[in-house]
Image: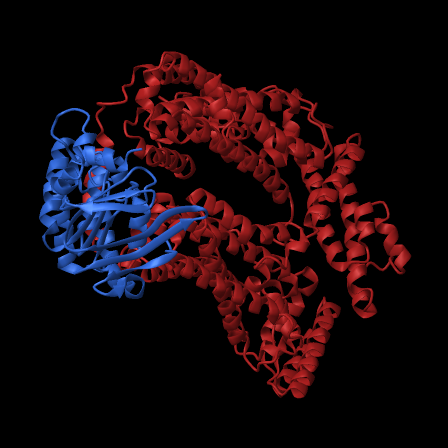
Chain colours: A red, B blue
Amino acid sequence: MTEWKRVFLNKKRIGIAVLLLIFCVGLYVYSLTDIYNPSPYSLRSTIAAAKAASEFAEECKDLPIEEIPEKVDEYLGRISDYGTWLIHSSDPETYAFFGNSEIVTAEDAEALIRDIPYLYGVKDNRDMYSQGYRAFYTAISGLKDQAEYLLGYRDYLEGIQAQAKQQSQVGIFSTGKGFSQRNLTKTAKDFEGLEEVEISFGSNSGVESWLNFDFNDYAYLIAIIVIVLAFLEERKKGLWSAVRSCRYGRLPLGLSRLGILASAAVGFAILIYGSTLLTALGINGGLSGLDRPLQSLESFRTCAVRTTVSGWILRYFAVKIASGMLIGLLLWCLLGSVANIQFSLSVLIGILAGEYILYEFLPVQSIFNVVKYFNLFSYVHTADLYTDYLNISLFGFPVGIRPLMLTTLPIAGVMLLVWALMIQTKRYPEGNKDILSKLSAAVNRVFDFFRSRLSLGGWEAYKTLIFEFGVVIMAVILVLSRSIYCLYLISEQDYWYQAYLQDLEGPLDESTYDYLARARENIKGSFNEGQLENSLNRIEAEVEKRFAAAEAGGFEPWLVDANVYDSCYGPTAKNAQYRSAALALLFVAFCAAGISAYERQSGVTLLVRSLKRGRRQLFIRKAVCAAATAVFVWTAVYIKEFFDFLDIKNPVTFGAPVQNIDALANFPLKISFGQYLVILYSIRLLMLIFASFAVLMVSQRCATLQSAYIACVVLVAAPALLSVLGVDALKYISPMVPVSSAEQLWKIGSGSLSPIIPWVIWSAVGILALIAAGLNWSKTGFAKSRGK
Amino acid sequence: MKLELKDLTKRYGELVALDGFTLTFEPGIYGILGANGAGKSTLMNLITDNIKRDGGSITFDGRDILEMGDEFRAVLGYMPQQQGIYDRMTAESFVSYIARLKGLRGKEMREQVDGVLKLTNLESVRHKAVGQFSGGMKQRALLAQALLGDPKVLILDEPTAGLDPRERVRIRGFISELAKDRIVLLATHIVTDIESIADKVILMKKGRLIDVDTPANLIAAIPESWKPVAYNLSLEDVYMYFLGD
């Protein structure tokens, strides 16, 4: 019982469990929202759309499936028509072109969405309606996809049987001895009889979105690793020999740990998968539809298991728990076999990285594909065993990867269980061969040659990258930052307008009118003359507006594609820009948090401060390192954003005076758009550097790396992240606004100078943080205030 | 070369950790003896400028060490009592890093790193991570870094703790050699270390300087009447007589 209490009542482990729960549910809900175009009301609209979709599915479930796509189209048509009315009704000419001629009055338009409470509630707010429209469109059109899948499922099954039959008649396959023929025969046999399964329409999105939420799998893996590492704590603390010398320190302790691991596998499966499943079902219409055959869900098209959705969920939990237990046993055995505990983390990372690379990157066609599927991560992503039908070749015979893995599970489990108990009872704490130490010394010999030549700054960088896990954090940042980009959409209605705009983009002069006149001549008699003329009218109006503005403002008139600017840097991208800033702050917090805390964690502050260059000079290097992490994050997030912008837009308008963009019409400086971008990105860099100084100061107050990560994330990044998720009140107490800068610049562009305030405040905070951290590091009296 | 401590005072709230401590150090080995809480670590932290003094002064060759700043730290070698060390560095990396912080560079740095590793008998494990070291090996690594840069003032807090007798004798001998033109302050609970190498012994009790003299003179100062049984007195008796309750 003592061991159970030690493992489960440990504050650190309880904290990790709570964090995993929060992250799983939070990220699951976030994954449902419009992540490419986030806004404070994304969540509300997503939940409303999910509810509407499940109600719609309930309405449709008794209809013949053939009728459902039409019903969906009608629904989508209504919400789309209202959107067009909301946007264009103020301009009768444009509305006449784009709108539905049957919708004439506001009452007509409102009648379209009266039965959709959420959209009706936001009917007068363009932004909220647009956001809601996107959420509803995604959710409802998914039902059409589902109906089309159901209609095609029997053809799919017949196709499998037909293919097997057909191939058996082709010469090279007809012998039936090769893997390919055996595979086709087995596949046909596995799917035989599924035609009798009565798949049906219903609300699928709850289970499907839960199934596709991979983060659960990683959270579960982390939880199991945390428990296994708890079993090795006595080694780390030098108590291994003492524990083994106790009466119950061998087999009884091993059995107790087996019980703990099993309980953890069950508990964390319920906590992690259960909480997200409940959330998913809660948002998407409850338990309705869980009694349908599994193949009713498109994700299980290739699954040959005959069960219901609820039956599969129970089976999935059972497999998940068994897999968790197996992973735990495997890691316990491998880490327990490492004589030197100092290497356990490296061994763990090595095992996981090796297995992940094989699982993710080994081609399916490889002759070694057994190790791709017979892999630790197959037990991590157990859902894939059901959603991906696959036979691998074992000595030329096809073996289903799911039956193979599920059969192996109990056998491997028993073997590992015995191995784990052997380690617990038979392995001696002392006198083991330490091969890893010898290997590490050989590697260190090479590294020491270079390390002993590092300058003081080089050492700080090295410590940040290696000892404070900077390399790992930076790799994660690079991967995560790939998912941040601006979404630039051209609506069908704007197609010709954009085409003309692209032709005319650049400085405006008399030749512009010649072009427009020629274009008007050319479109005469074309099948879409009305559409083209409307586009030319819009262009001409824009051109005249530019000429007038340029004359009044005294700058050169240019025609620019304001939509691109708007999508990447302008008001439309406001929320996406804030999200990028919040993520950049999170990255800076993680990257720079260890820079000062590492000395305290290692207990060397007193020693280091007693050295000639251990105060001011070392602190300067630390500050430079913090700033360098900010530069890295700026590159990963913002320079990448700039290259994304270049992908959308070639630099033709970089020379345009910035006042030619509406949002910046009153920008006080007479500069080009290119120069404006330089200012925008420079301010962002500066603000991120100030953020890194704030992190440095917070980090200095923390005694361990762990507490530094938590404190820095909570103080510097959390308000920004919560603000992005809809807690608007935190927007101004986080440095997100000055880091993002885009909104401030366009506010300045519209004539106001008050947006400068967040920059001034954050600059002052950054500089004061740097001074405070510097004084704190260098001043006398450090030992009293900071301890060792 | 003189390190002068005048009327040095340090308080932690109500507790007076160091009370008007006055002493002038000249080249030689000074062994500091005192019970836990006598003020030994406070004294060392004040000399290394790791805590703020409440009164008095510390001067090195007539200049206040706070004024000297980096200049004083350039002549200082400090081995702290706690085994705080960068666990993930190898012995060579750790000593090289500290050498950098002491302002050493190039060939001179590499020679000194090699020298102190050899001296502290860490040559054979120089590429091993310090985190894998035993307590005694960590102690030697800390001593090695303190010796870098040819320090004029060497402050050693429990330098022989955790070392086996052979290592202790070796290190002791080495410290004796070092003391020829240096001020060495040695705080330890191992009285025999002080007895065998200290030129002078500083007796401290409750933050105050009780006495400072050679081991022989201190032993001689114990009155005959105090001797419980007839035997040869040692520094342990000095401890018991001057510092015991």
Query: Quick one: A306 or A715, which is closer to the camera?
Result: A715
Query: Quick one: A725 or A206, which is closer to the camera?
Result: A725
**Looking at the image, is A411 positioned above or below residue A730?**
above
User: Residue lying farthest front?
Assistant: B225
Q: How many marks?
A: 0
Residue located at (80% from left, 34% from top) = A59
> Can the viewer see residue A291?
yes
Residue A216: percent from the left, percent from the top? 55, 34
Residue A624: percent from the left, percent from the top? 38, 61
**Looking at the image, is B123 positioned above or below residue A541?**
above
Residue located at (54% from left, 51% from top) = A715
Residue located at (31% from left, 46% from top) = B208
**Looking at the image, is A323 positioned above or below residue A103?**
above
Residue A427: percent from the left, percent from the top? 29, 18
Query: Quick one: B37 or A575, which is closer to the camera?
Result: B37
**Left or right: B38, with A63 as reference point:** left
